[in-house]
Image (cartoon, grey):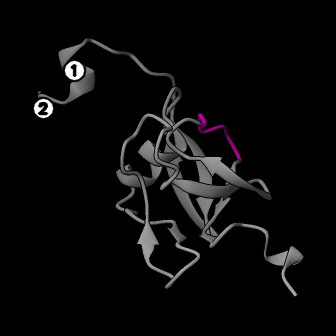
Amino acid sequence: MARTPAVLVRAEPGPPFEITFDGRTLTALPGQSIAAALWGAGILAWRTTREGGRPRGAFCGIGQCYDCLATVNGEPNRRACLVPARPGDAITPQEGHGHAELSV
C-alpha cells in the first residue's frame, strides 16, 4: 500500500466529488481546500498580479499572503487556501484585483 498522508494518519475521507476550474472538471475530496484540490490536479497558478500579470497560486497556505486569490462561484477575491471545496464549485482564474467589471 502506498505511504500517502491519508494512509499514514488512517484518514478515511468521504467519496470524491467534482468541481471545475476554468471549465475543466477536477476531482476534490471532502475537507480539501480549493487550493489543495487545484494542486492535486497539477494546477499551480490560478491568478495573475495587477502589475505585470505574473502568475500566482498558493504561497503561505494559511491565508496571510493573499497570493491564492481566486474567483469561486462568481465571487472574486476568495482565498483558495482557506475556502473548502464543495461539490459543483466553479473556480475561475482571477486577473488582477478581481473586479474587471468595475474597470473603465
List x then y, in percent, for residue 6: 28, 23
11 or 64: which is nearer to us?
64
> Would you say the magenta stretch is mainly helix, strand or loop?
loop
Q: Which mark is residue 74?
A: none
Q: Left of 12 or right of it: where is 63?
A: right
List x then y, in percent, for residue 98: 71, 66
Q: Residue at x 46, y 47 (%)?
A: 65
Asked if residue 17 is positioned above or below residue 30 in the image, the reply reads: below
Q: Amino acid at mark 1?
A: Val
Q: Amino acid at mark 2?
A: Ala
Figure quadrant of the N terminus: top left
Q: Quadrant of residue 5?
A: top left
Q: Secondary structure at mark 2?
A: loop
27 or 80: which is nearer to us?
80
Q: Which residue is mark 2?
A: 2
Q: Which residue is mark 1?
A: 7
Q: Residue at x 66, y 48 (%)?
A: 78
96 or 82: which is nearer to us?
96
Q: Secondary structure at mark 1?
A: helix
List x then y, in percent, for residue 59: 36, 50
List x then y, in percent, for residue 52: 49, 85
Q: Is residue 87 magenta?
A: yes
Q: Left of 34 or right of it: where is 1?
A: left
